[in-house]
Amino acid sequence: MQTHILGYPRIGSKRELKKACEQYWSGKISGTTLEEAGKQIRFQNWKTQQEQGIDLIPVNDFSFYDQVLDMSLTVGAIPERYAALVEKKFSSLDLYFAMARGYQKEGLDITAMEMTKWFDTNYHYLVPEFTADQSFSYHSSKVVEEFKESIELGIKAKPVLIGPVTYLWLGKEKTDGFEKIDLIHNLLPVYLEILKELVENGADWVQFDEPILGLDLSEKEKDAFLMVYKTIRKTFPKLKTLLATYFEGLNDNTGLALSLPVCALHLDLVRNPEQLEELVPQIPENLSLSLGLVDGRNIWKNDLEQSLRILNNAISILGRDKIMIAPSCSLLHVPYDLELENKEDILFPEIKRWMAFAKQKLKEVTLLQELSLPNPGKNQLLEFEANRNAMANRKNSDLIHNKAVKLKVESIAPADDKRKSEYASRSILQKNFLKLPLLPTTTIGSFPQTGEVRKWRSQYKNGFIDKKTYQGLLKEATETVIRKQEEIGLDVLVHGEFERNDMVEYFGEQLAGFTFSQYGWVQSYGSRCVKPPIIYGDISRPKPMTVFWSTYAQSLTKRRVKGMLTGPVTILQWSFVRNDQDRATTCKQIALAIREEVIDLEKAGINIIQIDEPAIREGLPLRKSAWESYLKWAVQSFRLSSSGVSDATQIHTHMCYSEFNDIMPSIAAMDADVITIECSRSQMELLDAFADFKYPNEIGPGVYDIHAPRVPSKKEMVQLIKKAQDVVPTAQLWVNPDCGLKTRKWEETEKALKLMVEAAQELRETE
Ligand code: GLN
Ligand code: ZN
């Protein structure tokens, strides 16, 4: 029985790779120094895994930016627009980063490759681009180089490749007249070349990541699976192939997966534990099973007793030799090392006892292996005992359980998630009460978070300035932003969000049931990392969270100030969530806390309240069959949070960039009075979903892109608003930027907003 992992985090335990990449991009270090930093991280990762006793250590899970981009370079899928850089003899590193980040220098302006979410995670990959005449060639030998590097260190590692069928699935068809899956015949020969080189260099095992085996597949995709893995088997009869599935169970693809001539099949038994029972009796003679027992997506300790039960059961049917133990998926999605957390006021010791980061998960994998032996060692038994105690302690801890909160969720009444009246009557009340002009102008919430603002926060957090001084500075910033908005002529103002570090963390810090880490970083994309809050227990709101800042801002102006909150689904989605109760219940607890805040804001005289929900779409399950039940509780949670106010109070929501087409009924069911969305980059195309649906409430389609410093012209914005007016009645439209302005500079922000207000005024006059 072997232990292995599918992949390890690679940003470095203290984000060394992030820092090195950013230094390289700003010209402060050389390519060689960056390469060296990468090498150090790989070595350190391998060493850690070796020390923890992992048998099969992965290579090629390392990446300077993204493993899908690595694969595109490996198979030579380099879009035409980068040809100029190849001609200029760019180093492979610079070409790589140009594809990841775009290139605007020396008269060139080449856009980056598109980025999108890696399945249902918060990791983003760079989308491969395919054309009808797409050809592939063996271009970068990164995987072979890294394999050789491991051999030199005396580790016979297991190279990891994104499987060819999943690789094609991840990409985008950039021209008409073909189906990307048909490219498999061009792509497979390149994979065979890579495998040949790996085999020649001594590779025993190769891991193929094919997570799409957990999704709804077309007949062509199924055929491709058979063709690919039969060919690989035929070409390399001695190579041990491991097919890795994760994030979903195999379900109706079980038969297909079991018919593929591979040596081992990896299953995500955290996401879908039931599949094992169905699968085990059908396992073909020569197939080993890799049991993904340790959660690669969350930070909780493994329940060893429960895992051991599953493991021993599998052993009794299949025998030890046919079983491998692993985490459920790559450990890329969890932080490095829990032992780095040493501040008890940040992460409570009792909660820390229930947790495991990547390094601790390695240990869990090897412990399971040892505990399944007929006579486990004494130390292992002690560890087992400690684990059992931690589990029991967590189950009964007062920190987790709050009877009042549980009761509140249980007694949610049917009327609680409904506004008092239908939108049609609310809208009349709101129009009379709020007295806003046609095409009202507003922003999405945050204003530039300058270096200064961030400095105040870090000075305050590190004890260099006291609370009063900090608040004084924030008050000044808030007053300035109110004056600026008045001067610009916006209709509905915001307080600017200067007091917030992050739209989820800010609320987590004030809600009971959340804790935090110092080094719990996870890669989001490239050098960008996030440190998700940790939801460990029942959630409640000890006291108002935003009323102070919203009412302070309102006291400074006669215009209306919009209250600003993050919605329950987004708070859930961007945190590590407790796994001892279903997500729906946790989400409803958050919803009730936000509801209290909404009611308090209204009481304090704030009559326009925005509840941001950019993460609703990304929470969708991978299988369509599970969408309905998710959408039901997600929408209900939003409605619970927003329905405690009177009809005249106007509820806004903001959803960033989302595909709305296939979830339009649910978006409408959220029943926000106003929804703002990102639209400018799609030239208002996203609005069509709302128009086709005849969406009845108000909409603010973003009229300018806030992701770049560029100031749009008034004419451009007028045109975009007109485009919106073509599909949505003017009385239903708002005018606003695409998203919050926190990453922008003041200079461009003021200019752009002035022009935006002028654009709205010009169009009002023509009505
Ligand atoms: N209110 C938030 C802001 O303006 C919204 C950000 C978001 O939805 N991503 O920053
Ligand atoms: Zn947004």
Image (spheres, rainbow, N blue to C red):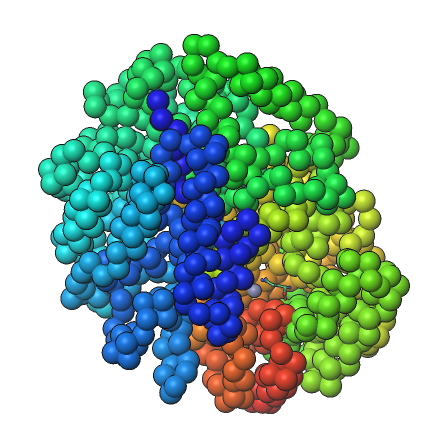
**276 up-or-down from 604: above or below:** above
Is residue 324 left or right of 456 when viewed as pictured?
Answer: left
Which residue is rendered at x = 44% and y = 63% of the image?
Answer: 34
Residue 109 in picture, x, y percent from top left: 38, 81
Query: Residue drawn at (37%, 17%), measured in percent from left and top?
Result: 314
Of residue 463 and residue 550, the one placed in the foreground of this image is 463
Residue in the foreground of this view, choosing between 145 and 367:
145
Indicate left or right for 254 with 309 as reference.
left
Question: Above or below — where is 16 with respect to 360?
Answer: below
Residue 85 in the image, given as x and y percentages of width and height: 30, 77
Q: Is residue 409 visible?
A: no
Figure disc tally? 0
Above/below status of 378 relative to 673: above
* Nearer to me, 526 or 148: 148
Q: Quadrant of residue 651?
A: bottom right
* Residue 34 visible here: yes
Ligand 2 falls in which quarter? bottom right
Q: Quadrant of residue 514?
A: top right
Q: Residue furthest right?
A: 468
